[in-house]
Image (cartoon, rainbow, N blue to C red):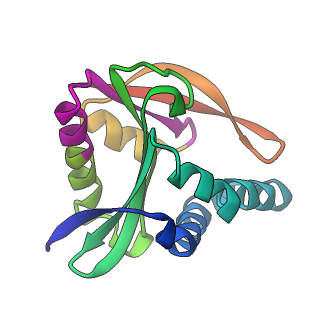
Amino acid sequence: MKLHLRLCTINDLGVLANMGKRTFIDAFEKDNKPEDFKEYLDSAFGEERLLKELQDINSAYYFIYKDSNLVGYIKLNENEAQSDIKDINSIELERIYVLSEFQGQGIGEWILAQVISMAKAKNRSYVWLGVWEHNPKAIKFYQRLGFYKFGSHPYFIGNDEQTDWLLRLDI
């Protein structure tokens, strides 16, 4: 298995929107009210919003490929693009998604190793992320890799206020 990352550009907008919706639907649709979920999908993965994020110098989307197959994506935020912390010594991993048919193959661990390498290359002290408090599989995965809880914040799916745990990995 050969894995690699590719930085997304505005030319990837349509594919990114589709990938974002597909992976988010697979992960969370069953746990949310349909009207709230649709509102969130339209907002978070709308092409206008994604275009703005792709043009932000403090955010970066990367596609993850296994051989020639697109299997997932990540979004990294730095400086003022970070959703909460906005610490120049950190990088936020805002999104990390792997298509369901490729999960369980070590791709998530590989992705995190790449993110840690990027953070080290930029002399960052830590990587942090938010994870839904009712996602025990993801929480266990991150904790196994050394992340620890340092806070929480509200996360809205439409009008439904949920809670994300904030997890941090010191590097």
Residue 41 percent location from the top left of the image: 71, 60
Is residue 130 highlighted in magenta? Answer: yes
Q: Visible in this render: residue 33?
A: no
Q: Which residues are magenta?
A: 115-134
| Residue at 50% from the left image edge and 21% from the top image edge | 85
Q: Is residue 70 left or right of residue 43?
A: left
Q: Residue furthest left?
A: 1
As drawn, 29 above or below 126: below
Residue 42 position in % (x across, y down): 75, 61
Residue sitting at x 36%, y 71%: 71
Q: Nearer the viewer, residue 30 or 121?
A: 121
**Left or right: 157 with respect to 26?**
right
The quarter holding residue 110 reads bottom left
Rendered position, 38 above or below 153:
below
Quadrant hosting residue 47: bottom right
Q: Position of residue 36 (x, y in %)?
A: 81, 53
43 with respect to 16 (left or right): right
Residue 107, position as x, y percentages in the image: 26, 61
Give the residue at x 33% y 20%.
Answer: 89
The residue closer to the viewer here, 80 or 145, is 80
Q: Nearer the viewer, residue 79 or 134?
A: 79
State whether residue 82 appears in this view. yes
Does the segment drawn in magenta span residue 6? no
The N terminus - image quarter: bottom left
Q: Nearer the viewer, residue 113 or 164?
A: 113
Q: Residue at x 36, y 75 (%)?
A: 70
In the rendered image, which quarter contains the C terminus?
top left
